[in-house]
Image (tube, rainbow, N blue to C red):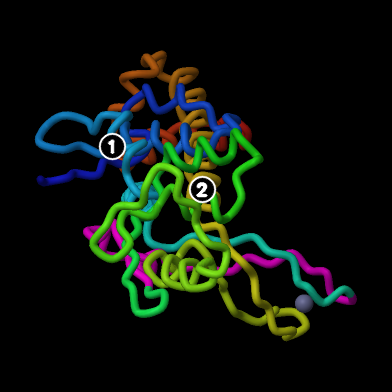
Amino acid sequence: MHYMVHAFGSDHSYLDIDFNNPAQSELAARIVANCLWCDNHSVDENEVWSWSLKRRLQALLEITMVTQGGEMLLQVRCSNRLCDEDIELPLDLERFRQDVNVDEFSFSVDSTEVMARLPNGSDQQRWLQSPVFTSSDIARELVLRIGDRQPGDDWQFPEAWLPNFSESLERQDELMTLEISSSCPVCENELNCAVDLETQLLASLALEQQKLLLEVHQLALAYHWSEAAICRLTPARRKFYLAQIRDLVEGASLQ
Ligand SMILES: [Zn+2]
């Protein structure tokens, strides 16, 4: 299958996406379904729910890179309490690109190989909606085979297996527990921050939507074009017309 990534905001329907939606799975699936095209039609949103979280993250990463370029600024606060400075750390998104063809992973317990699958969007939604899920319950849902047998319906995931399971899952999906190390440019304090990359990418796309809304507002006011027509303009042409409006406004204020 051949996928094509469209920039976020190249169609006016993207303006309808509600970034205040607290359900991250829903928001992520909607954006991926809007911006990812496969063989001339957009990807079905229901299909994205069945994708591993790793694959969904990679799709959002590609969409963000096509939309705003390969660098993203991460907002952090210096952990040195005497400094407490707000810092912007540049992140090179390219380095987070990963192969998403593998959806399964394995770990060993007492020389038996246990196969499991990566969690997907539907899993995430279900676990978040029901706080009674323990780590063992989650692991139980992901186990596919123990040795060459499928686990029975009443099989429980042994707690003693959790360390091996978690270690192997993290190795297969290392962006899940991403940590960025840097130093504060003000006090030179060493910074180690845990980064939820998907949340950061969504925040970055939310800013793009705000920017686009503002541009639509300015262009509609000046040229009386429709929202849809403005969104169809290439970013370069939009930039050109906005520059003309700015020149006119500045020229008027100088007179
Ligand atoms: Zn500092």
Horizontal and vertical percent for residue 128?
59, 39
The number of callouts visible is 2
Q: Position of residue 227 (x, y in %)?
A: 39, 18
- At x 32%, y 65%, the residue is 105
Q: CA distance from mark 1 to mark 2?
A: 20 Å
The residue that label 2 is drawn on is 204
Q: Residue at x 32, y 53 (%)?
A: 144
Q: Nearer the viewer, residue 236 or 11?
A: 11
Mark 1 crowd level (few <14, some 14–19, many ≥20, 10 Å Cα): few
Report the disc number at residue 234: 1
Q: Which residues are magenta?
A: 82-107
Compared to residue 220, the image places residue 131 above or below, namely below
- Magenta stretch containing residue 7, yes or no? no
- For this view, does 137 lie left or right of residue 59? right
Q: Position of residue 1 (x, y in %)?
A: 10, 45
Residue nearest the viewer, comparing 249 with 155: 155
Q: Residue 252 location in percent, x, y?
A: 57, 30
User: Which residue type carries mark 1?
Assistant: Thr
Q: Is residue 18 above or below residue 4?
A: above
At mark 2, the secondary structure is: helix
Asked if one can make out residue 1 in the rendered structure from this viewpoint, the answer is yes
| Residue 247 seen | no
Amino acid type of the residue that numbered disc 2 sits on in the rendered structure: Ser
